[in-house]
Image (cartoon, rainbow, N blue to C red):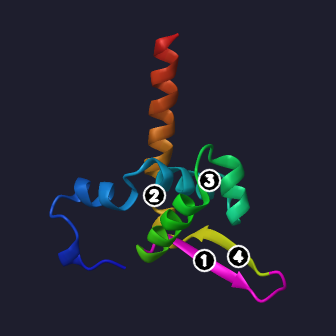
Amino acid sequence: MLTKDELPDCPVATCVRLIGNKWKLLVIRNLIYNGKQRFGDFLKTIPAISKKVLTDNLRALEKDGLIERKVFAEVPPRVEYSLSPLGGSLRPIIDAMADWGTEYKSNLE
């Protein structure tokens, strides 16, 4: 997890630093609206994301404390991702973005 000294002074810049790319937002969206996900679930529901990009973004979100990774001691190994309590606090932001996107699209028609 980052320290306060590693984050920008501006709170908006802090938010952008943590969730500011489209892949992270889509991973968080999946976890908010679909619950726990496995790696393959993300690949199926996030168009055009590569395995490497997905891996990098999952690691970053876990490092920043927004998601949790649970490894099951099975053969073959099974890994599930879920939102941490901190990550769950992003729900109003994602909901607002979804509402805004819906409104924007309806104004184009």
Q: Judging from the image, what secondary structure is the residue with disc 2 in?
A: loop
Residue 90 - label: 2
Residue type at mark 1 is Arg
Magenta range is 65-76
Q: Nearer the viewer, mark 2 or mark 4?
A: 4
Residue 30 - label: 3
Q: Quadrant of the N terminus?
A: bottom left
Residue type at mark 3 is Asn
Q: Judging from the image, what secondary structure is the residue with disc 4 in?
A: strand
Q: Residue furthest top?
A: 109
Q: Judging from the image, what secondary structure is the residue with disc 1 in?
A: strand
Q: In this view, does 60 lie to the left or right of 38?
A: left
Q: Does the magenta stretch include residue 72?
A: yes
Residue 84 - label: none
What is the C-alpha distance between the residues marked 1 and 3?
15 Å
Q: Looking at the image, is 7 positioned above or below residue 70?
A: above
